[in-house]
Amino acid sequence: MKYHLVAAAVAASLSVSGLAGCGSGDGHATPAAKASSAHATPVLTVKAAGETYLKLSAASNAAREAWMSAPAPTAQNLAKHKRLAARAADATVAFSQGLRAHRWPGRAQPYVTALDKALQERAAAYRRVAAAGTVSAYLAAAAQVPVTTSLTADVRKALGLPEAAIVKGVTPR
């Protein structure tokens, strides 16, 4: 009998709190309201999207270049290399999150979505490099980082941007 009273009280509490959540006056949107407001974000124009893409990609590109242009890793400079890889991971995550924060022109959106996924994989690969404990483990992990992808060319073309500079010694994946 107690179980049924407790269950009834919980059910009543949930239904009241559920109703209260529909129009919360505390300034916090409900999950449903947040989802609908995400769709209220306007689609970027092609010009604005191109400018946004260039801004978002700049820090990630710079961090990648700093990591790739560092002298060969040794036991003495491994900590510096690991920091560079961690910075590249952070910059790549920021780039990925920035892509998701916008609505892109229809033609570019599928490429942006695919690039976002590739960036998430790249960030994880950078994290594995940054976690390496030895030079040989670092080099093995570094060899697995997809530092470029043909998706960037697809996004740039869809946004009317010129082709990007080629990453020397790397074939896009």
Image (cartoon, helix red, strand yellow):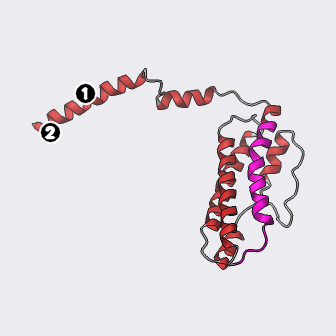
Q: Position of residue 75 (x, y in %)?
A: 67, 78
Which residue is found at the position 74% from the left and 43% from the top?
56
Horizontal side of 28 relative to 86 (left or right) equals: left
Answer whether residue 24 is magenta in the image. Answer: no
Residue toward you, 166 or 71:
71
The residue stretch that appears in magenta: 50-74
Residue 63 occupies quadrant: bottom right
Horizontal side of 32 relative to 42 (left or right) equals: left
Query: What residue is pinned by disc 1?
Result: 12
Which residue is found at the position 64% from the left and 76% from the top?
137
Q: Name the amino acid type tagged 2.
A: Tyr
Q: Secondary structure at mark 1?
A: helix
Asked if 84 appears above or below 153 in the picture, the reply is below
Query: What residue is pinned by disc 2?
Result: 3
How far apart are labels 1 and 2 at the CA level?
Answer: 14 Å
* Label of residue 1 in the image: none
Asked if 157 appears above or below 18 in the picture, the reply is below
Number of numbered labels in the structure image? 2
